[in-house]
Amino acid sequence: MTLESALTLFVAVPLLTAGVLVAVASRTRLILTVLFAVLGTQLAAAVATVPWVSDGSVVVHQVALWAPGVSIPFVLDMFSALMLTVTSLLTLTCAAFAVAAGEAYKRFYPPLVLLVTAGVNGALLTGDLFNFFVFVEVMLLPSYGLMMITRSGRASVVGVAASRLYISVNLLASTILLIGVALIYGVTGTVNIAQLHGAASEDTAVAVATALVLFALAIKAAVVPVHGWLARAYPKMSPAVTAMFSGLHTKIAIYAIYRIYAVIFDGDSRYLWVGVVVFSATMLIGVLGAVGEAAPRSILAFHMVSQIGYILLGVALFGPIGLTAGIFYLLHHMIVKAALFLAIGAIEVRYGPRRLGQLSGLAKTEPLVAVAFFASAMSLAGIPPFSGFVAKLSLIIAALDAGQIAAAAVAVVVSILTLLSMLKIWTGIFLGEPTPTDSRTLPEGLDPAHSEATGIPDGRDVDGRHRDGVEITGAAAGATPTDTMAPASTTASTTATDTVTETATVADTAEAGSPDPDMVPPGRRIGLALAAPALALSVVTLALGLGGQLLLELSGTAAANLYDPTTYIQAVLG
């Protein structure tokens, strides 16, 4: 196998492994071992592709060795290599969080994650519009399953509505995307991106068809005014799924917008003003939406919309500086936003979903999560020495260089509002004196007497074992999933509370003391395993800030391939 043909392994390995894991669904430990082996190997392989194309070269494999223009091309350049690396890192990190939170022990969670991974990798590598649509669907279909199986407890009306909205919007966007691709094929006779170079700038019919594709991608990317679905759906997903989707789904759409406009529109300057207006509005409306929210994840969801405006402003400032700044911002944002969702997710796993003001003093009781959140929040706001400062400064410089003074001003104002919103979460949750927690509001199944309780109502695998592998004994062995998922707020003697109490050992009880039946004294409950994923990503954003020159250079190489796609086209067409 040649190095070029090895590109197909980014899709084939996770896809085939997912099928095998379904057949051995009862072997929880084996499945998780295989999952992390595949994700870890993929991350190493993705990192190895970066120096492979660091000189600006483009690597192509024509699948099944069909002639160029006929086969499905797998294309690797610096942009796709960087995206592969960051998406692999985020998938691995979110999977580690899912294990710590108990979500990964849901049946079919590992194979579904691998299917999502295969779809993401394929979408990043394909050089064919129709196959891009296919890989997006490969990514989305298992995502719907992940949303369902990771839902804890009984589904609320709001949760069901959010899931329905997420699925409906994505199905609609996929339909529009497919229609746009069909129109492009009907007008040009091809869906090969390289063969379509400059077609939209030369033919109005192709421009309209391609604009339909870009509109569908804008929906998936949650660009204003088609952004409302993200702010309503993301906060209702499980913490691990929210973090993973934040780094994958919308970012694949953004990647495609960059690629399509650079190649098919050939960076046509006639339409760039539309992007500047829409993306500036996305920045501003997204951050203003966060002002009215009181739940941390809802605030972060609106900020995600705002930051998408920043990222896409790079393509509207089409040029070497603008594209470099946009790509750097994209990579930075994927890491920082996932870190923020994981930090808040760790709090929700242990303390339950809370609004601002219902929990305080976590900076003293949960220092690891506090550090991870603070570092990531400052990076999101663009405070040095984190990567967000380099990203925002580069983008503002690019806007000024392109003469877009208004866009640069909006970027500065939104940065200030972002900082205020992050401080709003910080003061509402982390500052102040630690407050006793009302046991009646703890997550379902959480024993207030134990600092390391799972906080997951059904944190057992299909073999009836706890997520740490300890056999359930005594009365708990006969507990049903319904029993363990009974709401803790009904009475103090619910089945779920009885089950946890009966499984506690005497030593555990002695060490924990005898807490008040209703009020739990403040104390650390978020362990290292749960805090480590967010903490690790916060370290990455700090490293990217201190060593931003390296990533800027790599982003510059990626931008050069987009600004002048000649090398890309020659490599694909031979």
Image: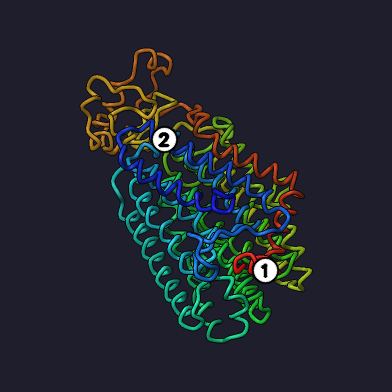
Residue that protrudes farthest toward the left in the picture: 478
Report helix, strand or loop for mark 1.
loop
Label 2 CA crowd tier, 10 Å (few <14, some 14–19, many 20+): many
Q: Please tell me whether residue 204 is drawn above or below residue 280 in the rendered image.
A: below
Query: What residue is pinned by disc 2?
Result: 32
The label on residue 147 is none
Q: Please tell me whether residue 470 is drawn above or below residue 9 in the rendered image.
A: above
Label 1 CA crowd tier, 10 Å (few <14, some 14–19, many 20+): some
Would you say 215 lies left or right of 441 here? Answer: right
Q: Identify the residue at horizontal 39%, vertical 26% (top origin).
A: 468
Q: Identify the residue at horizontal 54%, vertical 53% (top origin).
A: 5
Q: Between residues 399 and 497, which one lies in front from this camera angle?
A: 399
Q: Between residues 440 and 93, which one lies in front from this camera angle?
A: 93
Whole-percent x and y of residue 184? 49, 79
Quarter of image, res 517: top left
Report helix, strand or loop for mark 2.
helix
